[in-house]
Amino acid sequence: MSLQRRRGLLCLGLLCLTLLRVAPVGAGYNEGVLAYERGDYATALREFRLLADQGHAAAQHNLGLMYATGRGVPQDDSQAVQWYRRAADQGDADAQFHLGVMYEKGQGVPQDASQALQWYRRAADQGHATAQYFLGLMYEKGQGVPQDASQAVQWYRRAADQGHAMVQVILGLMYEKGQGVPQDYGQALQWYRRAADQGNAMAQYNLGLMYHYGQGVPQDYEQAYFWYNLAAARATSGLRNLMMVDSRDKAAGMLTPAQLAAMQAKARTWQPTPEPQRSPTAMPATPPPLPPLPAPSPRIVLIRQAQQRLQAQGFDPGAIDGVLGQQTQQAIRWFQNSVGLLPTGELDARTLEALGVR
């Protein structure tokens, strides 16, 4: 990924987090970045601490991440929070985002969804795409704020517009299901295609489904096969790969030998076209897990049971939280496709019966 400011990548829990940026701010800072990149954490720590003590926001942010990940220092969430806060108070968007993560997770501070929301919003308002994505998640799930799918869509759109394929897939799902927006297969197709063109396997599979079943486009088994084939070649999960291969083979059975050969040749020469990334922070690999609702309604109990059955059969629904969120809906689609049902992502009577949920 090409960025104006070079960063090294770190991982904290379930989040892919960025660390260091290079900017024309003096030799000491850049020396710290170079030292970190070659694994000389003692030198990086010395350079960043000197600048951080002088009020340098980027150095303060980097110190926070070093404490959060235990690079060059003993891992210490409370120290990470202190340095994040000092940088965040100066308006550093990355520090604001990471401080929000600490509040959401309860790492180094008491868990506080309202504080997490506040810091995500401050970063999101500066155009931080990952913060925009997380803010959308909080609105979708009702964490620290009343549940509001339309607000979730607004924040997802701002992140998706910055070229992030994963959020483009989520936005496509919102349009496909009519969550927070009127149901619009054409818009869903548009967002899936943008992510698919970047090489996102989930988007490619969903695009294949839309062509297969004629949702938002005329039914086209050639296009369905083409996108299924690309998705199957890129899926990292063994189960997902099997599902994509199964869909691909079903579509192949609808084609003539000449059509099949043409689509295979097209797939062999296809290359992804990444969109320019305007956000300084990489997208997280997965959304953060969410706590279950305290007073479950019958609907929530039903969804939890379905999530448990999906998980037991190898279809990952995400958190067993009684919320019919994007990951659960995608797991339902995988399951429905595997048993020959229309992959709607909804818990209709036939799907519940197939899952054995009463």
Image: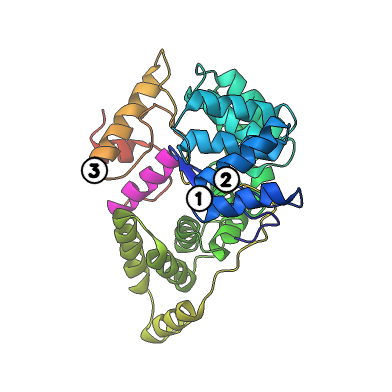
Name the amino acid, label 2.
Ala
**Residue for point 75% across, 30% down:** 90
Q: Give coordinates of residue 256: x percent, y percent.
A: 38, 82
User: Is the Cβ of the residue at disc 2 closer than 8 Å to that at disc 1?
Assistant: yes
Tell how many labels: 3
**What x and y, as percent, mark residue 258?**
41, 87
Task: Check disc 3 and give the amino acid type.
Answer: Gln
CA–CA distance in space, label 2 to label 1: 6 Å
Few, some or many C-alpha atoms within 10 Å of disc 2 (few <14, some 14-19, many ≥20)? Answer: many
- Which label's residue is closer to the chain start, 3 or 2? 2
Whole-Å distance between the Cαs marked 3 and 1? Answer: 46 Å
Q: Which residue is mark 2?
A: 44
**Residue located beneath label 3 in the image:** 313
Give the residues in magenta.
Answer: 327-339
* Left or right placement of residue 102 versus residue 23 in this view: left
Residue at the disc numbered 1: 40
